[in-house]
Image (cartoon, rainbow, N blue to C red):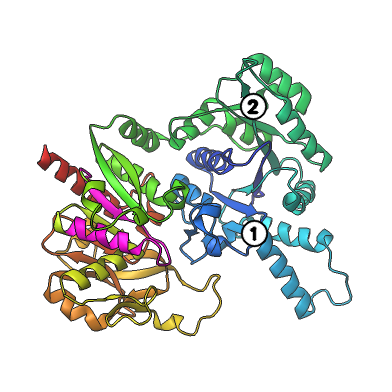
Amino acid sequence: MTAVKYIFVTGGVTSSLGKGIIAASLGKLLQARGYRVTIQKFDPYINIDPGTLNPYEHGECYVTQDGAETDLDLGHYERFLNISTSRSNNITTGRIYNNVITKEREGAYLGKTVQVIPHITDEIKRNFYLLGDSGDYDIVITEIGGCVGDIESLPFIEALRQARFEMGSNNALVIHLTLIPFLKSAGELKTKPTQHSVKQLLEAGIQPDILVCRTEYPLPEEIRRKLALFCNVQHKDVIESIDASTIYDVPLLMKKEKLDQRVLSKLKLSATHEPELEGWKDFLGRLKNPSYEVNIALVGKYVALPDAYKSIVEAFIHAGAVNECKVKLTYFSAEGIDDATVKHTLDGVDGILVAPGFGERGIEGKICTVKHAREQKIPFFGICLGMQIAVVEFARNVLDLAGAHSTEMDANTPYPVIHLLESQKSVTQKGGTMRLGAYPCKLKKGTKAAQAYGDSLISERHRHRYEFNNAFLKDFEEHGMIPSGINPESGLVEIMELKNHPWFLGTQFHPELKSTVLNPHPLFVRFVKAALDLKSGRI
C-alpha cells in the first residue's frame, strides 16, 4: 500500500493570513484529482478546545458530527471538501498536555522525568499520524496555528521537524504561508518580513518546500526570484496568493499557480488526472452573477465580529447561489433593539435571522425582533437560542403567559417554556459537557421543515443545554406554533414553526454547520427563497 503523504502548513509574519483557506483550497484540488484527503488543525493555546472561548476571542466554535467543539477552520475544511471532520481533526496544546499529564498520573512514564522533549513532542507526533494511520486517507494536511516564532508554537514546530525527518523527504513537505506587504510610501512590495520568517523556520531546523505569499498586488518575477534566492526554494515553488473577492476563488487561483502540481511532484504522486471542478465552477458562476438581491437582518450579540457567525454567513452564500440571489447580510446588535426602535431598525428587510448565543445580554431585543417578524409576516429563522427566543415571545404575546422565559435567563419564571435538559442537571464542568454533535430528528408531514428537507428523518448537529419544555406543547400547538421536528428517542422538540405565516421556523440544532458548497443546507435555501418571495411581492 502506498504510504500516506503528509503536508504541513505553517504561517509567518502575521496571523489571519488564511492558512485555513490555503489548506482547504489545496485539499480541494488534490481531492478533485482523485485523492482521499483530510485536513487537521493544531492550535497552540492551552484551552483543551474552543468551547469555553468567547466568540470575540476566537470566532465561532465549530461542532463536528461526533460532538467535538473545534476551531472555525474546520468549517472551511468541511465546506470545501464536502466531508465530515471529527475531534481528531483539531488538537490544542491543552489537549496534548492533558493527555501527557493523564498518562503520567496513570504511571505510563513511571521512573521517567516528563519533559517537553520527548514526551510532549511524541504526543504531538502521535496526533499528526492518527488520521493517516486510519487507512481512510491518501493525504493528510496539517495546519499549524499561530505564527512561527511564537513561544507557544515551539513544541509543534519541533515535533514537525522530528516528524518530517522520520517520514522521509518524499512523504512529507512544508508549505509556509507568509505576507509580502506593499509600502505605499515606497511604492513597492517588500520581501524582508518573509526572509526573516523563513530564517526563524530554518533556525528551528525546518526548510520550507513551498512559499505561498499573500499579497495585495501581483508578484513580479524579480520578487519571485529574490524570494527563491534568499529563502532556499526553487523559483517555481514561490506561489502567489493574491487577495480574492471571495474565498471560493482561492482553489482556482491556486490551480492557476500550479500549487497542487508542485505538491504532487515533491511527494512523488501522479498528476495525470486533472482536477474535476465543474461543480465548483458552476457554483462560482451563480455566486458572481446573481439575478436578484435580498437583505437579511442578522440579529445577535456578537455582531461586531462576523467570524462569530462564520458558518451562518457561509451558509447564506451557498443558499444565495442556489437561488441565483445575492444575500446582503446586515448585522444588528440585539442590545440596541426595543419596542420603540424595532420597526424603524428593521424597516425594509426581507428576512430576519436571530442568531445563537448564550446568556441574557440582548435577550429582550431578540424578543422584540421575533415579535416584529411574526406580526409583520417577515420570513423568520431562529437558530438554537433563536428558536428558544421565538418560543418565549409566542408564550408571552400569544398565549398570554406573562413572565414566560427560559430558566437560563430567569430561574424563577412562572412559565419555564424553555428549561434545562434533564441530562444537564448534574453537570458541573463547563467544557465539552453540552448536548453536542449529531442527533436524529423526525419531521412532521406537510410542514415547512419536511418540504425543505424532502425527507422524514434527518440528522443535525447540536450545541445546547436548554430545551423546549414539553409541558407547554399542547398549548403551543392549539395556538398555531407546532413542533415540526422531534427527536425520536427523547421526544425533545427540534423544530418549531408557525402555521399561519409565510415562513417562520426555529431550530434547536445548528443547520449552518452542515452547509457546504456542493450541498447547501435546505433550510437556508428555503429561507432565502421566502425572503425573495417577500421582496418580489413588495415590488
- The kind of secondary structure element at disc 2 is loop
Tell which circle, 1 or 2, labels the residue nearer the N-terminal end.
Answer: 1
Depth check, front residue: 108 or 526: 526
Q: Residue at x 35, y 82 (%)?
A: 412
Distance from disc 1 to disc 2, alpha carbons, whole Å, reads 29 Å
Looking at the image, residue 513 sits to the left or right of residue 324; the answer is right
User: Dot 1: what SS?
Assistant: strand
Disc 2 residue type (three-letter): Ile
Residue 224: image quadrant is: top right
Answer few, some or many: residues within 10 Å of disc 2's Cα (few below 14, many 20 plus, some between 14 and 19).
many
Q: Which residues are magenta?
A: 348-374
- Under mark 1, the amino acid is Thr
Q: Is residue 534 visible?
A: yes
Above/below status of 313 relative to 387:
above
Q: Is residue 437 above or below residue 318?
A: below
Q: Residue drawn 14% across and 58% down?
A: 375
For disc 1, the marked residue is: 92
Horizontal side, residue 328 vs residue 123: left or right: left
| Percent position of residue 370, x then y | 24, 60
**Of labels 1 and 2, the one closer to you:** 2
Q: Quadrant of the C terminus?
A: top left
Name the residue carrying label 2. Answer: 180
Residue drawn at 75 percent across, 46 percent down: 164
